[in-house]
Image: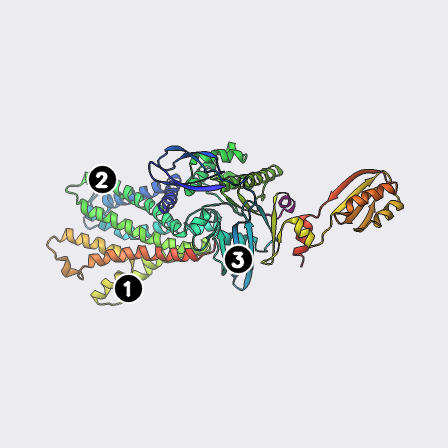
Amino acid sequence: MTVKTIKCPKCKNEITVSGKPGEKTQIICPKCSSKGTFTFPKENSKSKTITDSFTIEVNNLTKSYNNFKAVDNVSFNVKSGEIFGFLGPNGAGKTTTIKSILGLINANSGEIKINGFDIKKRGKEAKKYIGYLPEKIAFYDNLTALQNLHFYAEMKNIPKEECKPLIEEMGIGNEVNKKVGKFSKGMQQRLGMARALLGNPPILILDEPSGGLDPRGVALIRNKIKEMKDKGSTVFVSSHILAEVQEVCDRVGIIDKGVIVAEDSVSKLSVKLNLKPKLIIELEKISEKIVESVKKVEGVEKVEAIGVMIHITCNQKAKSKIIISVEKAGGDIVNIQTKEPSLEEVFMRFTES
Amino acid sequence: MIVNAIFSIAKKEIMDNIRNLWIIIMSVIFALFALVFSYFGSSFGASPELGFQSFAFTIASMMISVVLLIPIIGLMLGYAAILGEIEKGSMSSLLSYSVSRIEVILGKFIGLGCVLFLSILIGFGVAGIIIAANISNPNYGNYLLFIVASVLLGFVFLSLAMLLSSILKKRSAAIGGVVFLWFFFAMILPIVVGSIELPTDWIYGVNLLNPISTYSEIISMSMLLEFLESVDINQMYPPNYNIWLLLSTIAWIAIPLLLAILTFKRRDI
């Protein structure tokens, strides 16, 4: 995602636009309504994926409330173009960290950079790139959904015409002219996501995006997150629904009692914790001979027979050998399932007191 | 960009107050106030008489009530401007945009200031036109000065309310603060100053410390100039007192607003 600030040739008003390299975009100046087309310059590199440059850099962040350290010397980086899951139990310091990243909280010490801009010293420039969905969604209740988004579009200096399609994309197109005060929690959450997506932000910060949503809404948000990543945006998402995070995140950071306890991809964290995958084999008929033969395979840690199923905890390389040994012992395999170490296991291990 | 953000926030405040009819309600209150005092103002004297009176008489008879009404309206307009949005949660969304906290405070002050200005202008303005049509030789200058001074008095209390709003954390505390400020400036301070025997020169100085007294002095000076045509105002007041009154009013607007910006900048949202 490329961000460009261009000047309206007519009224000299500065407009910030974002899009993919080579993409053509229609621009309507919010000030004088002049129309024009802008083509984003093409990049020589291949399609942008995760790069080694950092979009969000948090270094030694500390925030205390009275004598309580909500966040203690926290450091982590979010790579450009990745989806970064930020996890932690209630009260671990997730929202404090997010609010510090946005400059909403004055940290006691530490440094935060967004796209290289220090949030304390150059907050306005840093925030240009951000779309934010807060945990506690709030709008101006006396305004309609569309009027609310028009206000934020004005704040972002982008054309108001972008608002209605976004509301429709979030599945609340029939409610555009309804006052937000009459919206349910789920509808407000969808509108909050539309607000965060205004102007195709290169950085999305989502604090518990699935709160108050039905399964359809959860899926919608998940797809939007993936869509934004495909467009080249960096997504920072805090959530307590671990299965959801596992599905979309490239890397996760786990915070507990104000301290970062882990930061990596789920698979690498599983290796670090020595978490083994589980192989579940369903047989036509189970026998002691089959169970014993599986136990003898190198790399097998634990074998449990439950009905006609054998649950085997093993390392990755042992899987094929297990299947061969089952067949050699006369087992008639009906179904095979592999359960990789889950984020939940990783989370529980890192946050256990 | 700085102008854009301030303008957008100010515009939203104005539109909100148009939508919830505050501007109309306040305008009607101000208009009724002026018309009632002008028409019935002299019906309680030694020689009761109904009918519209001169601007000077109208202003003089409603002064005692205006100095109570305008501060309370200014305070009510501004006390929730910052605090209300923080409590509700919309401030964190607003500040996630490319906007500084100074811009938020200025945008809100300008927006709410416009609401106050429009209400006073429309209310007293419409009343002024009606009164002028029913009296002979209206002195527009005095009435205009009264409107401008009233707007400035409103700005002072709006600015104080913004300070309350950026310091206090709970709406209930802010309402308490509104009541205290109003009571302090409108009741306690005048009573205390009135009960202490101070030299005349000191009283002029002390009056600069209370925006309501400053307002009253501005109006009194203009009245004196109209009623006593041959008076030498410089002999009655300390030298350049009118400039001191103006400076004091500007300081009463600027200092609380500046303090509001400083406290809001340090506040965790």
| Chain letter behind tag 2 | B
Segment tinted magenta in the rendering: A238-247
Residue type for callout 2: Ile
**Residue picked out by circle 3:** A59
**Residue picked out by circle 2:** B129
| Chain letter behind tag 3 | A
Residue type for callout 3: Asn
What whole-number distance in Å separates the C-alpha atoms at marks 3 and 2?
A: 65 Å
Mark 3 Cα shell of 10 Å, populated few (<14), some (14-19), many (≥20):
some
Q: Say which quarter of the image contains residue B246.
A: bottom left
**Residue picked out by circle 1:** B193
Q: Is the same chain shared between marks 2 and 1? A: yes
Q: Is the same chain shared between marks 3 and 1? A: no
Residue B189: x and y in percent read 31, 61
What element does badge 1 sit on?
Answer: helix
Q: Nearer the viewer, residue A16 or A168?
A: A16
Residue type for callout 1: Val
| Residue B2 visible at all | yes
Residue B228: x and y in percent read 13, 53
Q: Say which quarter of the image contains residue B22.
A: top left
What whole-number distance in Å separates the C-alpha atoms at marks 2 and 1?
A: 37 Å
| Chain letter behind tag 1 | B
Queried whether the magenta region covers residue A203, the answer comes back as no
Q: Nearer the viewer, residue A109 or B226?
A: A109
